[in-house]
Image (spheres, rainbow, N blue to C red):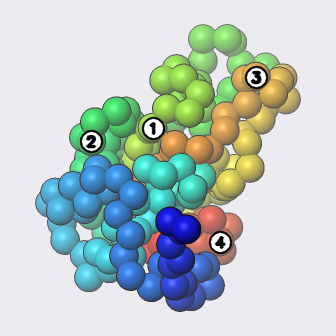
Amino acid sequence: PGSKSIQLTIGEFDNLLPKEHQVFDERAALAVKSLAVPTTKSVDLSQVVAFFFAKTLAPAVVISKNKEFITSLVQAVGSQKGVHCIAGVDPDSYKMMKSLYDPNDTPNLRDDILKFGRGAFVAVELQCQSKDAQLCIRELIEDSPSMTAFSTNKSALYKSGLFFGVYVNGEITPEVCSRGSLIV
């Protein structure tokens, strides 16, 4: 009594999606409606953003060759209540994480995200101008916890609540493509 079933369909990446769009959190619909750069994949995008807010997609990764779209998307998601935003990160010039030999105060994206607290909603814009930049982000956008050589379970970066908008200039590498929730 009181239980509902949802019919599923196979999505673009052979993942299961609800046949009829499900709204888990109004912020998802608000974010997609507020996009400055529209997309023909708004239904799929809305579902990915909904799964991000439901913390069932960890992390949510949207990839595009359209820089303005990714900027607009990260701003739209990052402007929702309770979401922090880190915009304009260039992996070619900003460290993704510290190495064992870096000073403790070395700026890096992993620590920037961790500053918001474990489980916080964070939208991150990554601007990959080169294949090297794409290689730098692979570990960060995969679904396993991000560890460094000196990480403990307590200091690991867990991906629940993380949204990555990835702009790629040129060909999308297989490593980045395989970690995408949606390519627009």
Q: Which residue is mark 2?
A: 80
Amino acid tagged 3? Lys
Residue at the disc numbered 1: 121
Q: Which residue is mark 3?
A: 154
Q: Position of 137 compared to 54: left or right?
A: right
Look at label 2 and name its amino acid: Gln
Q: Residue at x 67, y 67 (%)?
A: 175
Q: Nearer the viewer, mark 1 or mark 4?
A: 1
Which residue is identified by label 4? 178
Residue count near mark 4 (Cα–Cα under 10 Å), binned few <14, some 14–19, many ≥20: few
- For the residue labelled by badge 4, is the local secondary structure a helix, a strand or a loop? loop
> Residue 82's x, y, as percent?
34, 33
Please give left or right for residue 125 compared with residue 40 in the image: right
The mark nearer the N terminus, 4 or 2, is: 2
Circles 2 and 1: CB atoms closer than 8 Å: yes
Asked which secondary structure carries label 3, the reply is loop
Q: CA distance from mark 2 to mark 1?
A: 10 Å
